[in-house]
Amino acid sequence: MDALARRPMRVITIANQKGGVGKTTTAINLSTALAAIGKRTLLIDLDPQGNASTGLGIDKDEREVSSYDVLVESATISEAAMATAVPNLSVVPSTLDLLGLEMEIAGAAGRAYRLRDALHFHATDEAQFDFVLIDCPPSLNLLTVNAMAAADSILVPLQCEFFALEGLSQLLQTVEQVRDSLNPTLDLHGIVLTMYDGRNNLAGQVVKDVRAFMGSHVYDTIIPRNVRVSEAPSFGKPAILYDMKCSGSQAYIRLASEVIQRERRLAAA
């Protein structure tokens, strides 16, 4: 039997405190690609903007139970999860209620572990997913801390731009703090370079610099700038459903393959 198939549910947080780096696009299309290759996948939307939910075709009026309800402990993961148009892919949608969560549970004991505890309950109470991906807001707040505390590893989308390494250093410091105080097993799954434009000399230099700085932590797959990927959310579809043959969709399919390969190496270790 495949070593990966024997592993318990794997939780990967997709995070970057900088906005506009392709984080939600990566969450939508990586989860879709994993589902397309037969992995039972759940995407948890922790961004109050709810773009991951919208990008998977979940209308705001349909989000009767959300990630907010999970974090205030009024609903379970299974009660909040909604099926999508993609076989094997479910989503726990987001609502604007998340904006007030930090103040609402500021004094609560174990507030950083709300999502971890909900996922642990789900793993023992329901049929497990193979992968849970968590889309975070573009900030290092309590929502992101909950996602990191619940995760086995973190995946970082990094835009091919001048200040990429500066932002990465800040994020890695936060990961180290979470590892020291909340989740000692949190690992860096990988860094995916996004929005790459081969016509731009700076983008090529950023790729070289990030690979020199982070080595094997950087995925081989690079996500290009692609009009079809940008168009897809307005149709409520992942790019892989909207146009599977476009360069962006093909890149996310390759990224999913890399994620699986890394998971197999971890399972065999």
Image (spheres, rainbow, N blue to C red):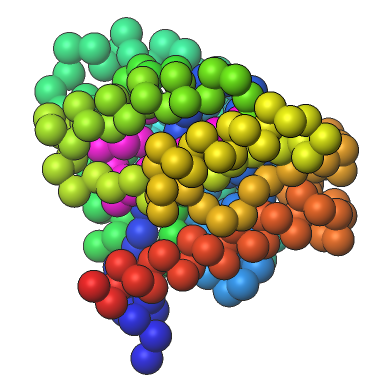
Quarter of the image with the N terminus in it: bottom left
Q: Position of residue 255 (x, y in %)?
A: 59, 58
Q: Position of residue 193 (x, y in %)?
A: 59, 41
Q: Quadrant of residue 35?
A: bottom right
- Taking the image as shown, residue 84 lies to the left or right of residue 131, namely right
Confirm whether residue 70 shows in the render: yes
Query: Front-most of 83 and 265?
Result: 265
Q: Does 252 appear above or below 98?
A: below
Outermost residue on the bottom side: it is 1
- Percent from the top left, x then y, of residue 62? 66, 36
> Position of 93 compared to 178: left or right?
right
| Residue 102 as seen in the image, left or right of residue 48 | left
Relative vertical location of residue 47 with respect to residue 86 in this rendering, above or below? above
Q: Which residue is pictured at 30% across the width and 72% down the height?
A: 267
At 85% from the left and 54% from the top, the residue drawn is 246
Q: Does the segment drawn in magenta span residue 69?
A: no
Tell me if 106 is positioned left or right of 248 in this view: left
Magenta span covers which residues?
144-159
- Membership of 158 in magenta stretch: yes
Q: Does the rendering let one see residue 58?
A: no
Residue ID at (41%, 53%) = 216
Instruction: Give the camera-side residue of 240 and 82.
Output: 240
Residue at image point 87% right, 38% down: 227
| Percent of width and height locating residue 203 | 68, 32
In the foreground, 71 or 242: 242
For the C terminus, the image quarter is bottom left
